[in-house]
Image: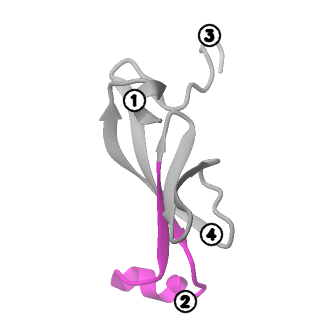
Amino acid sequence: MPGGRGYEGGRTRMGTVVLLNVYDLSPANEYLYSMGMGLHHSGVEILGKEYSFASGGGVFDSTPKEAPGAKFRESIELGSFEGGSAEVS
């Protein structure tokens, strides 16, 4: 990106972009999604990390858009966050 500072985890002049990453957990979602149904997993992406919840594991962070056993479907922008990494952790 010429003249840019590169990727900064979604940081903008107005704060950090917060995304909801949605994953398919079943091949049947190819048919069910258009009806508003399906088996899904989601994670919140902020400051270059994705936070999710797993039964037995609690809340954990991972690499955005990579969920074991799931296929990434889409990102939905939720808004922006004005804080820094200390407020997220």
Classify mark 1: helix, strand or loop: helix
Query: Badge 4 is on which residue?
Result: 71
Sequence order check, earlier mark of 1 and 4: 4
What residue type is disc 1 on? Glu
- Cα gap from disc 3 to disc 2, whole angstroms: 44 Å
- Cα gap from disc 1 to disc 4, whole angstroms: 29 Å
Query: Badge 2 is on which residue?
Result: 28
- Cα gap from disc 4 to disc 2, whole angstroms: 12 Å
Q: Residue at x 51, y 71 (%)?
A: 55
Sequence order check, earlier mark of 1 and 2: 2
Sequence order check, earlier mark of 3 and 2: 3
| Front disc: 3 or 2 | 2
Sequence order check, earlier mark of 4 and 2: 2
Q: Is residue 42 magenta?
A: yes
The circle drawn on residue 3 is: 3
Category of crowding for the residue at label 3, using alpha-carbon neighbours closer than 10 angstroms: few (below 14), some (14–19), many (at least 20):
few
Q: Is residue 54 magenta?
A: no
Residues in magenta? 23-44
Query: Badge 1 is on which residue?
Result: 87
38 or 86, which lies in front? 86
Percent of width and height locating residue 64 = 60, 48
Depicted 13 relative to depicted 57: above or below:
above
